[in-house]
Image: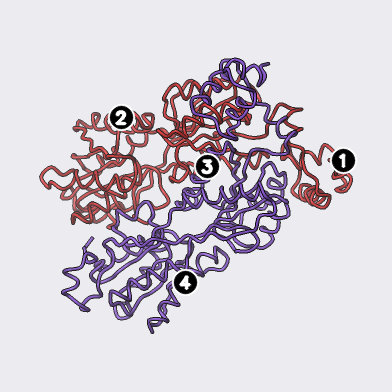
Chain colours: A purple, B red
Amino acid sequence: MSTIADVATRAGVSKATASRALTGRGYVSDETRERVAAAARELSYVAHSSAMSLATGRTQTIGVVMPHVSRWFFGEVLEGIQAALLEHGLDLTLYDARPGTATRRRVFEDYLARRRFDGVIAVGLEPAASELDALLALGKPVVSVIGAEGATSVVTLDDAHATALATAHLVELGHRRIAFLGGTDETRWPHVESERYAGYESEMRRAGLAAEISRAPAELSMPAGYAAAVDLLSDPSARPTGIVAACDEVAIGAIIAARRLGILVPSSLSVVGIDDHVNAEMFALTTLRQVPHEQGRAAVELLLRHIDDPEAETVTLRVKPRMVVRGTTANVTGHSSVAVRDSSLSRRD
Amino acid sequence: MSTIADVATRAGVSKATASRALTGRGYVSDETRERVAAAARELSYVAHSSAMSLATGRTQTIGVVMPHVSRWFFGEVLEGIQAALLEHGLDLTLYDARPGTATRRRVFEDYLARRRFDGVIAVGLEPAASELDALLALGKPVVSVIGAEGATSVVTLDDAHATALATAHLVELGHRRIAFLGGTDETRWPHVESERYAGYESEMRRAGLAAEISRAPAELSMPAGYAAAVDLLSDPSARPTGIVAACDEVAIGAIIAARRLGILVPSSLSVVGIDDHVNAEMFALTTLRQVPHEQGRAAVELLLRHIDDPEAETVTLRVKPRMVVRGTTANVTGHSSVAVRDSSLSRRD
């Protein structure tokens, strides 16, 4: 069996360089990395990662716990984590923990307890406190994406700021009846949902307006937003002229509901989302952009800092959203028809 | 430091049972598993997975290579793989290989070459033959989800059958001008896209009708379907009455395009998708259902068979789609107004 020394000799580099090239830890030029990789292939060299783990106590693996890989936000975060880990030569072990399942219980009781990783990134973990405690009890660094501050370092959108900006945008356009469409289900992601509602509510209060919420029944998805919007919009006498949606998928569901009810967007109803979801542009959706891919990358950098320095202080990285004005928001009907015609905000979808 | 013997004693079971309970390999009752897990927690027992790997030559880890985790099909397959692996006590290491990126090259050249897994599931791997060869050269079992048959065992939807059923459904409803909306881009997933086109084309030929294709420009997504449908539908004189879409996201994009163009679905245009995507029901989409979660589970079972028996023959598991008739398909306008009124197929969305 070939050794790292054989590979180094064949590639014409030192053992240390060959090791750096093969593990991805530390700098080597692309050209050297490729020469070493070629030598390793020719010699059928296999890195003894198990033996390496015993020697260093490191697994060169990061665990990722998340409840849904197949939803946009989570999938994008996961891609960002993966991209950053690859740059650092680290593997990613995925622990899929869908809420309320027996699998989730096993993930926390058995799989994570094996500690086959150097640290954990927990994405969208509900603060069922026992679960976070279980993670922390493993004695490995933990970083959260979406989550309660304090116990771990956290990467999160500034949720309250996002809905405050969305609400202020509608208020500036003259809207007075503005509803919040989404959930505040405390059993889900309270640090998302209640923060988003709070941002809307405080901005409405500041403007001297009454807050009004229409809960998405099951989850923050397009069909849930559709159903909640049908409820909200079917009575013409009680209809808002503006909607702040808890996320883009809910906003898109509301736009589709409005079309089916014959309500024109944006001339009779303005809708703002949060996310800049992959489908937002197609619906010309005005939204507050976040880039979950970058949040995943940031979580990796934070985690590596905690792994390298166990005494490092926990921090919260609060990402500011950026307003993207497209075609689903306009001056409230009758408020200023001249402005409606002139404004770039008044495009009909 | 506690040993497995300490855990077994505390839990009142044999060492073998404690080991089965902690590794998840082999049967133990839920009650026993929980008792052993509790004992392990109380004793802060850590399984020496690295040492175990050296002894057995197994890593208890399965590698998964996929190009997009954040798209519905891939995310659902990944969840199915994860669920099945957890039942077998195996970890999942994710290798995200987006097409045409430097990351993807490194995944194939470096990361996979470390072989820190017992086998690989390759999902949606384009048959850039060198990549599949690189995977096979690792000498570990490989199973593909979507992929060329022969070199590895494959789990796949019967794509040609799906579009043949979709086309036959429209032909039975009296449609004569039926377009295929999607791609046949050979650089993407030819075993999906060309098979789906082939099923449509052969069914059109069987019915004595002319095939007609409108390519989705970039990928099989909702915005791409929208753009392709706008092209296809904007000339009233050349407009088809039926669309077979390459997947549900493309079909939903087409439905939205039709609404914007003032074309009523299904009375002036019938649309059929493939997938039964999470958003299909909301659009009352008639579709051919596949369950990617189950395909992920099936890939795990196939892979474990190949790991346990390296001589096992490669097989192709071709999953039959199931027709789900909802509200986007109806008799062609004027073909039989009585049937339109009477048929359950004629619901307007």
In the image, residue A341 sits, relative to residue B131, either above or below, namely: below
Q: Are marks 3 and 2 in contact (CB under 8 Å)?
A: no
- The mark that comes first in sequence, 2 or 1, is 1
Residue B300 seen in this snapshot: no
* Image mark 1: chain: B
Q: Which residue is mark 4?
A: A197
Decide: few, some or many residues near mark 3? Use Cα within 10 Å; few <14, some 14-19, many ≥20.
Answer: many
- Chain letter of the residue carrying label 2: B
Q: Name the residue at 76% across, 27% down.
A: B55
Q: Residues at marks 1 and 3, common chain?
A: no
- Do the CB atoms of the residues marked 2 and 1 lie less than 8 Å apart? no
Which residue is the site of mark 1? Answer: B5
Residue, disc 3: A82
Could you tell me residue A125's position as x and y percent?
Answer: 59, 57
Residue A211 in sight here: yes
Q: Is residue B299 above or below residue A270?
A: above
Q: Position of residue A3 (x, y in %)?
A: 67, 19
* Gap in angstroms between the C-alphas marked 2 and 4: 50 Å
Q: Amino acid at mark 3?
A: Gln
In space, the residues marked 3 and 2 are separated at their CA atoms by 36 Å
